[in-house]
Amino acid sequence: MARVAARLPETGEQSTHPVDEVLPLPKLALYGFQHVLAFYAGAVIVPIIVGGALKLSTEQLVYLINADLFTCGIASIIQAWGIGRIGARLPLIQGVTFTAVSPMIAIGLGAGGGTAALLVIYGAVITAGIATFAFAWLPPQAFRAVMRLFPPVVTGSVITVLGIVLIPVGLNDAAGGLGSPDFGDPKNFAYAGGTMLFILVLMKLGRPFLSSIAILLGLVGGTLVAFLLGDAKFGDVSQADWVGVTTPFHYGAPKFEWFPIVLMLIVMLITMVETTGDTYAVGDIVGKEVDSETVARALRADGAATALGGVLNSFPYVAFAENVGLVRMTKVKSRFVVVAAGAFMILLGLLPKAAAIVASVPHAVLGGAATVMFAMVALAGIQTLGKVDLKEEKNALIVGVSLAFALLPATVPVFFKEHMNADLSSLLNSGVTLGATAAIVLNLIFNGLGRDDAHSAAPRAELPAQAAAPKDGAEPAASAESAESAEAAEAAGAAEPADSTVAVAVVADAGADEAAGAEKKPDADEAAATAS
């Protein structure tokens, strides 16, 4: 009762949460396109790397990129809009996970490369997607038990690792892109630095609208300067087709082999940790309570998108940390912005010529913007770790050792390339994989399994008691009419289990979970108001 009343303003009328606000169409389009630009490089780099390693032709590579964009759009709409009990209904963009790159290359090379290798990869991707989808439908008690593996010390460490691992990706782009003839040229850093400075100036101005599109304006401004100086090329645009449709099983029927399937299942375990962390992080940023059911819906969207990716000639999907950083920077909380971004991605996936225009943004310009966003991803992880008592040595060790393991592949790559079995290397040669695994294992060693929900174990103030019995002389939080409205809202919430914060509670714990929600929500609303 108190939980619902806490969501009502003083007038007694229930307001729309910023996450569920449908913005005017021009703003939806503008903010959505900014999300597309923010995630574009990360979205296309996976098919580029995998396709290059498998020696695909240019035509085949372009097809992979278009298929990836098309499926990204569908997956993002499922995650943000929600279909029944699938999708977190939060501003989360879905993109192909970097964690799968090394395993997919290993699977593909083991299958002989070329399009024949893609069939083996797609068989493993489809199976792993179905398994993830099924896992997220576990009975509530079993799912809650699994979620205890991911308390804030784990998810915060994983998100921080993601940001730290991604920052070098942005810096490599800022240098001109790995493998480019002018890699490391000071001119590239000038473009990257200028783009970054322009974005920071826009953020410093403090005007909400300018701040919310700072990344987009930075990318457009940097590209324009590069074009005027002759360093942005749009020649590929004229050569691209106007329309290109992605068809299911374009390269033939998928092949199902046991080792690639096992490898991809392990990849999906890691991506589940990523998505869990990103879901809690974006929930904190937008001031929306996230419970086990929300995480389950997010993972179901991951599984459905991954299985769909295998059908539509793409790869495993995960909630993209890059765009979590963008939500934090812009403070635009509406999930319908992500729906608009999904529509743009579907359009780009159908229009190779339009995709070629976006792809013409110079690497250095993209790197300057990406570095800022990746740093904000790491900050989101640090913010999550702020909920953890790091004065306790065991928690500090979990965080510190996890970060150390995450840096191993980038610091000593020769260990994985020359001194490790190729199959094992394909799995472990990833900072995210090592960091996430270390965080989970160390947390089990030091903390074991907590009794409560992974993200509701921290002590909270007795807000419901205060709400029920205000101090003498204080005005009640709501009038009698407001209380009646609250009761009606409570009854309506009970009729919609898909969106209810108690949908995953077992009967024995339902009362405790309801109280936890009542205590937690006022803090979330206050945080949302502060962020706005």
Image (tube, rainbow, N blue to C red):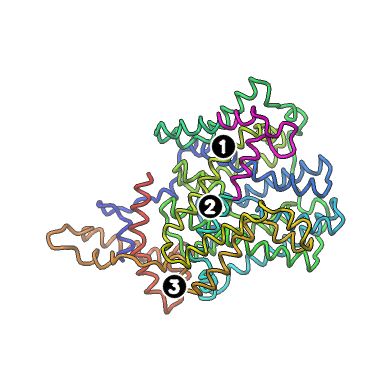
Q: Is residue 171 magenta?
A: yes
In the picture of the structure, the residue carrying the numbered disc 1 is 369
Q: Position of residue 199 (x, y in %)?
A: 50, 33
Q: Is residue 343 left or right of residue 465?
A: right
Q: Which badge, 3 or 2, comes first in the chain's sequence? A: 2
Q: Nearer the viewer, residue 333 or 376?
A: 376
- CA gap between label 1 and label 2 equals 27 Å
Q: Position of residue 362 (x, y in %)?
A: 66, 32
Q: Start and end of the magenta stretch?
A: 165-194
Q: Nearer the viewer, mark 3 or mark 2?
A: 3
Q: Dot 1 surroundings within 10 Å: few (below 14), some, or many (20 or more)? A: many
Q: Nearer the viewer, residue 83 or 379?
A: 379
Three-letter residue code for mark 2: Trp
In the picture of the structure, the residue carrying the numbered disc 2 is 81
In the figure, 516 relative to 522: above or below? below
Q: How many numbered marks have been drawn onto this rendered protein structure? A: 3
Q: Position of residue 152 (x, y in %)?
A: 47, 62
Magenta span: helix, strand or loop, mainly? helix
Q: Position of residue 10 (x, y in %)?
A: 25, 52
Q: Identify the mark at residue 452; answer none if there is no mark.
A: 3
Which residue occupies the extreme top position in the image? 228
Q: Nearer the viewer, residue 399 or 162?
A: 399
Residue 309: which quarter of the image? bottom right
Q: Which badge, 1 or 3, comes first in the chain's sequence? A: 1
- CA gap between label 1 and label 3 equals 39 Å
Q: Identify the mark at residue 302; answer none if there is no mark.
A: none
Q: Is residue 475 left or right of residue 302?
A: left
